[in-house]
């Protein structure tokens, strides 16, 4: 799927990394009762769960699957989170097929969660699959449904939660509020003590889904100038990390890893040719790329920049 300026965005990869990195924060935000029910230290991600859908004859990859031990009990459960970046009419039966497959394979209870990240439609989505006969309901399958375009971004202001900061960019935002949302996301991010790579990723996630126009950016700058000094400092932490200090600190490999994470957050999985071109960069050039990445509107512009370095 393509973004606002025509670049291809790997929505599944972005959301999988966000939730996979901050599983507990995601659950604390949307399913707090479930967090209290599991042992956080037992968290285990199950990667690339693939199965063949016999009904459709297609292979499907489960977006995110996490195993937890139940607190005070000798059993484990699975939490399945499925991101849906576009509206799909048969999503309810597909969630049930995922549930049935995971239950049969792992012999564990499954808690299903759908994260609907599409922009339209805004009508409330279904979150139930039923099978009925005359006078008899044979099956009623319910799952949690988080529909971002029905959530008000203002309700998540002040949450010291990286998932809240990232997903505010996909919530219901009035056009006039877009500069303010970007301001608040940056300011809230500045209050968290995340490592540099995670800070860069959250900021890249927000900028991927909340691309300000030139006029909107000028409005945001005006709002920044009106902030008290101590609030400006919070705002500048994520700004300086990406745009000013770049990747000066840490070893070359650490800078390379953070840079690749930032680029993949903006443009999706990078090709081997792009990765090799990045590996050939001298430390000074890698720093320049870290500062220049925010000016690239498409992956093609990144390719052009790397080609010029040769």
Image (spheres, grey):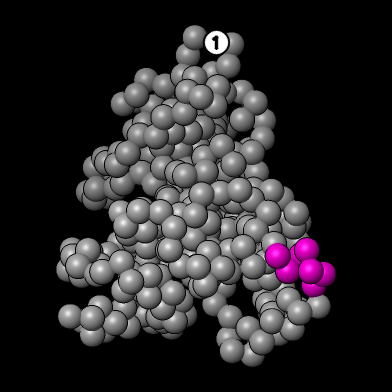
Frontmost residue, 21 versus 104? 21
Give the extent of the magenta segment: 227-233
Q: Position of residue 173 (x, y in %)?
A: 68, 71
Looking at the rendered image, the quarter that the C terminus falls into is bottom left
Query: Residue at position x 40%, y 54% from top?
Result: 250
Query: Residue at position x 52%, y 72% from top?
Result: 244
Which quarter of the figure has residue 224?
Answer: bottom right
Frontmost residue, 261 versus 123? 261
**Relative vertical location of residue 11 with respect to residue 297 in this rendering, above or below:** above
Q: Determine crowd level at label 1: few under 14, some 14-19, many 20+ residues with C-alpha closer than 10 A.
A: few
Query: Residue at position x 64%, y 67% from top?
Result: 236
Which quarter of the figure has residue 25?
Answer: top right
Q: Position of residue 289 (x, y in %)?
A: 36, 74
* Residue 229 lies in the magenta-colored region: yes
In the rendered image, which residue does mark 1 sit on? Answer: 73
**Relative vertical location of residue 94 with respect to residue 238 in this rendering, above or below:** above
Kindly give the residue lying farthest to the bottom in the view shown: 215
Query: Viewed as shown, does residue 273 lie left or right of 283?
Result: left
In this orientation, does residue 273 appear?
yes
Which quarter of the figure has residue 124?
Answer: bottom right
Q: Position of residue 217 (x, y in %)?
A: 63, 83
């Amino acid at each position: 799927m393509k973004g606002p300026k025509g670049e291809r965005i790997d929505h599944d990869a972005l959301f999988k990394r966000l939730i996979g990195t901050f599983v507990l924060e995601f659950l604390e935000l949307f399913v707090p009762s479930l967090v209290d029910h599991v042992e956080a230290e037992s968290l285990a991600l199950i990667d690339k769960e693939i199965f063949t859908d016999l009904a459709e004859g297609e292979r499907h990859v489960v977006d995110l699957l996490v195993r937890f031990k139940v607190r005070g009990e000798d059993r484990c459960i699975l939490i399945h989170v499925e991101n849906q970046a576009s509206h799909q009419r048969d999503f309810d039966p597909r969630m049930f097929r995922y549930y049935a497959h995971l239950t049969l394979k792992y012999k564990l209870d499954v808690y299903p969660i759908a994260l609907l990240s599409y922009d339209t439609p805004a009508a409330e989505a279904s979150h139930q699959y039923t099978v009925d006969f005359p006078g008899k309901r044979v099956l009623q399958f319910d799952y949690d449904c988080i529909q971002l375009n029905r959530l008000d971004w203002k309700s998540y202001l002040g949450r010291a939660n990286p998932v809240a900061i990232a997903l505010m960019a996909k919530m219901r935002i009035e056009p006039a509020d877009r500069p303010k949302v970007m301001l608040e996301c940056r300011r809230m991010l500045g209050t968290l003590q995340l490592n540099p790579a995670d800070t860069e990723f959250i900021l890249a996630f927000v900028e991927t889904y909340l691309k300000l126009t030139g006029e909107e950016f000028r409005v945001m700058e005006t709002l920044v100038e009106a902030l008290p000094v101590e609030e400006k400092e919070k705002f500048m932490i994520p700004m300086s990390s990406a745009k000013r200090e770049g990747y000066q600190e840490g070893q070359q490999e650490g800078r390379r890893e953070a840079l690749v994470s930032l680029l993949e957050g903006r443009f999706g999985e990078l090709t081997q040719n792009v990765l090799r071109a990045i590996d050939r960069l001298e430390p000074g050039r890698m720093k320049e790329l870290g500062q220049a990445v925010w000016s690239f509107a498409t992956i093609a512009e990144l390719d052009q920049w790397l080609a010029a370095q040769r």
